[in-house]
Image: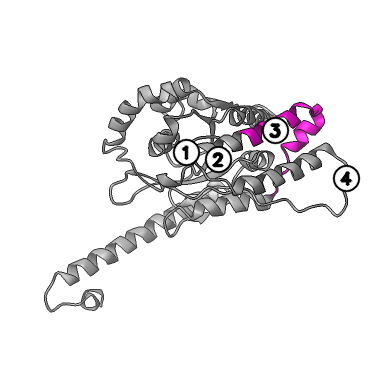
């Protein structure tokens, strides 16, 4: 039981109903009964983590969620609510000015997953404009490669009709198996990779109920013991197994949960232009829909009459 979440949940539900947020969500039934699993979401608002937590609050009643969060959130750079939640819910801190932060975050994440908890990651690492999905960092792909934990995809955006927050939750999945080398290189990280992939095959067959997720916890614990026996260099290489194809695989899963017209972008500069095009396109669609609705309400008049 996560006491901290249970205490703040009633306040969160009240705030979520305010016009500024007006939270709605779908797919909460896809979330496993409890941890351990990894939540991967795009980043659109300062309260994405808490909005997702409210959407799967039945799970959070049973186990804690630990989000990756840049240290600037603690300093209030993402708003006061974000700063309060950073301190209250506790996070896996990421100092974007320091080197080697991703391996530290992955190591900490593995520790929490071994305890049956949830880990939340925004692979974009920063917010992107509406209608765009930014390039993914390798951290969550490396984490997904390192442990046999299911990944829960989440798409987040502001609805056009009321600017409320929409959270769409998808079906859990696993990272695809890595391609086997033609010859055994004898490296410990290669042996762990094969071991993790074999455990994933077992994990896929399990129900996402209480019993099944307990078995997943035991699998991650076994992998954790292997990590504990590695030397520092091999340990670091285990957390660097992801490829660009892995990031594409993850971003595709998120795109499936976002509205029509959203596009992947390679940078914030590109995102600005794409977002403007997206918003203009959606405005045109709304205008046509309004014309169509007006035409249908006008006797003897067809939409073509209004558009000619």
Could you tell me what secondary structure mostly forms the magenta stretch? Answer: helix
Q: Is residue 303 above or below residue 280?
A: below
Quarter of the image where the N terminus is located: top left
The residue positioned 76% from the left and 33% from the top of the image is 236
The CA span between labels 3 and 1 is: 21 Å
Q: Which residue is mark 4?
A: 185
Q: Secondary structure at mark 3?
A: helix
Give x and y (percent) for residue 45.
42, 38
Q: Nearer the viewer, mark 3 or mark 2?
A: 2
The CA span between labels 3 and 4 is: 23 Å
Q: Earlier in the sequence, mark 3 or mark 1?
A: 1
Q: Which residue is mark 1?
A: 33
Q: Where, by quadrant of the figure, is residue 203 drawn?
A: top right
Q: Secondary structure at mark 4?
A: loop
Q: Which residue is mark 3?
A: 222
Q: Where, by quadrant of the figure, is residue 88 drawn?
A: top left
**CB atoms of marks 1 and 2 within 8 Å:** yes
The residue positioned 60% from the left and 40% from the top of the image is 149
- Chain part drawn in magenta: 218-243
Q: Earlier in the sequence, mark 4 or mark 2?
A: 4
Q: Nearer the viewer, mark 4 or mark 2?
A: 2
Q: Earlier in the sequence, mark 3 or mark 4?
A: 4
Q: Nearer the viewer, mark 1 or mark 4?
A: 1
């Amino acid at each position: 039981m996560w006491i901290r979440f249970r205490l703040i949940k009633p306040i969160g539900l009240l705030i979520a109903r305010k016009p500024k947020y007006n939270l709605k969500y779908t797919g909460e039934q896809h979330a496993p009964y409890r941890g351990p699993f990894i939540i991967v979401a795009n980043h659109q608002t300062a309260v994405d983590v808490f909005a997702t937590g409210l959407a799967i609050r039945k799970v959070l009643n049973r186990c804690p969620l630990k989000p990756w969060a840049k240290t600037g959130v603690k300093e209030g750079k993402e708003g006061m609510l974000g700063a309060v939640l950073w301190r209250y819910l506790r996070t896996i801190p990421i100092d974007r000015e320091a080197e080697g932060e991703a391996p530290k975050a992955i190591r900490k994440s593995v520790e929490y997953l071994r305890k049956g908890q949830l880990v939340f990651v925004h692979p974009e690492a920063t917010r992107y404009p509406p209608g765009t999905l930014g390039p993914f960092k390798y951290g969550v792909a490396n984490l997904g490669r390192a442990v046999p934990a299911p990944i829960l995809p989440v798409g987040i955006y502001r609805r056009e009709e009321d600017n409320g927050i929409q959270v769409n939750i998808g079906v859990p999945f696993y990272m695809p198996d890595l391609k086997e080398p033609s010859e055994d290189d004898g490296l410990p990280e290669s042996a762990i990779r094969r071991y993790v992939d074999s455990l994933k095959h077992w994990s896929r067959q399990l129900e996402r109920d209480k019993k099944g997720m307990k078995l997943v916890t035991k699998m991650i614990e076994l992998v954790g013991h292997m990590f504990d026996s590695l030397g520092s260099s091999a340990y670091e290489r285990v957390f660097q197994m992801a490829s660009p194809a892995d990031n594409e695989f993850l971003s595709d899963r998120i795109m499936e949960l976002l509205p029509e017209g959203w596009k992947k972008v390679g940078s914030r500069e590109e995102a600005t232009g794409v977002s403007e095009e997206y918003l203009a396109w959606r405005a045109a669609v709304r205008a046509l829909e309004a014309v169509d609705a007006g035409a249908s309400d006008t006797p003897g008049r067809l939409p073509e009459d209004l558009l000619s």
